[in-house]
Image (cartoon, rainbow, N blue to C red):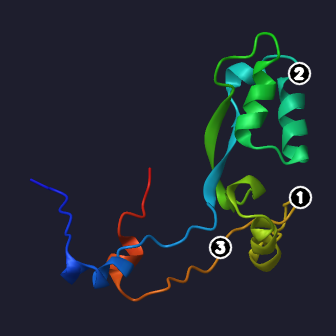
């Protein structure tokens, strides 16, 4: 049986600093979203998808624009694996996404634009309990 135990009292006041969560500046996401086969069959959906990508819209905004087209399915986008990570400005503090792409994005043969294929990860502590305490989310 797993139970979450909360310790209180003056002895634990000093340890409270270590129990704080690490700050999150943004989210780097794996993969992309593409129109479903059913959505691709609807005239105008691909144009809305392409226009949304060029405008820098989020996938949620692109899906909303696609749903406004008659005949578009309720879920017009599906996740797709890609060899690069997605860094979108709406997932970060202002200017951080651009800085990450400026520093670490590379343009490989066949790419129309630079993509984030790898990036360094540095943790602010060697204590695994501080770094990984309740930080992973689904």
Report the Cα–Cα distance between label 2 and label 3: 35 Å
Q: Marks 1/2: CA distance?
A: 23 Å
Residue 117 shown left or right of residue 121 in the figure: right
Mark 1 surroundings: few (<14), some (14-19) or many (≥20) residues within 10 A: few
Give x and y (percent) for residue 121: 56, 79
**Of marks 1 and 2, which one's residue comes earlier in the chain?**
2
Residue 126 in sight in this render: yes
> Which comes sooner in the sequence, label 3 or label 1?
1
- The residue that appears at 68% across and 61% down in the rendered structure is 84
Q: Residue furthest left?
A: 1
Q: Is residue 18 visible?
A: no
The image quadrant that residue 133 belongs to is: bottom left
> Which quadrant of the view contains residue 127?
bottom left
Earlier-in-chain disc, 2 versus 3: 2
Measuring from the top left, give residue 51's x and y in whole percent: 90, 37
Mark carried by residue 112 = 1
> What's the mark number on residue 44?
2
Looking at this view, is 98 or 50 the one in front? Answer: 98
Between marks 1 and 2 in the image, the one whose residue lies nearer the viewer: 2
Q: Mark 3 — residue? A: 118
> For this view, does 68 lie left or right of residue 47?
left
Q: Dot 1: what SS?
A: loop
- Residue 48 percent across, percent down from the top left: 87, 30
Relative to residue 98, is residue 12 depicted above or below? Answer: below
The dot on residue 47 is none
Whether pointer 2 and pointer 3 mark residues with C-beta atoms closer than 8 Å, the reply is no
Specify few, some or many for label 3: CA neighbours under 10 Å numbering under 14, 14-19, or 20 or more.
Answer: few
């Amino acid at each position: 049986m797993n139970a979450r135990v909360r310790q209180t009292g003056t002895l634990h006041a000093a340890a409270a600093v270590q129990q704080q969560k690490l700050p999150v500046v943004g989210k780097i996401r794996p993969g992309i979203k593409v129109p479903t086969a059913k959505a691709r069959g609807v005239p105008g959906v691909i144009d809305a998808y392409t226009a949304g990508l060029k405008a820098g819209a989020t996938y949620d905004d692109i899906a909303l624009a696609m749903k406004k087209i008659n005949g578009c399915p309720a879920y017009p986008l599906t996740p797709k694996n890609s060899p690069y990570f997605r860094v979108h400005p709406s997932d970060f503090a202002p200017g951080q996404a651009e800085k990450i792409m400026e520093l670490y994005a590379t343009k490989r043969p066949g790419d129309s634009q630079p993509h984030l294929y790898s990036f360094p990860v540095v943790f602010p502590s060697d204590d695994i309990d501080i770094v990984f305490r309740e930080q992973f989310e689904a």
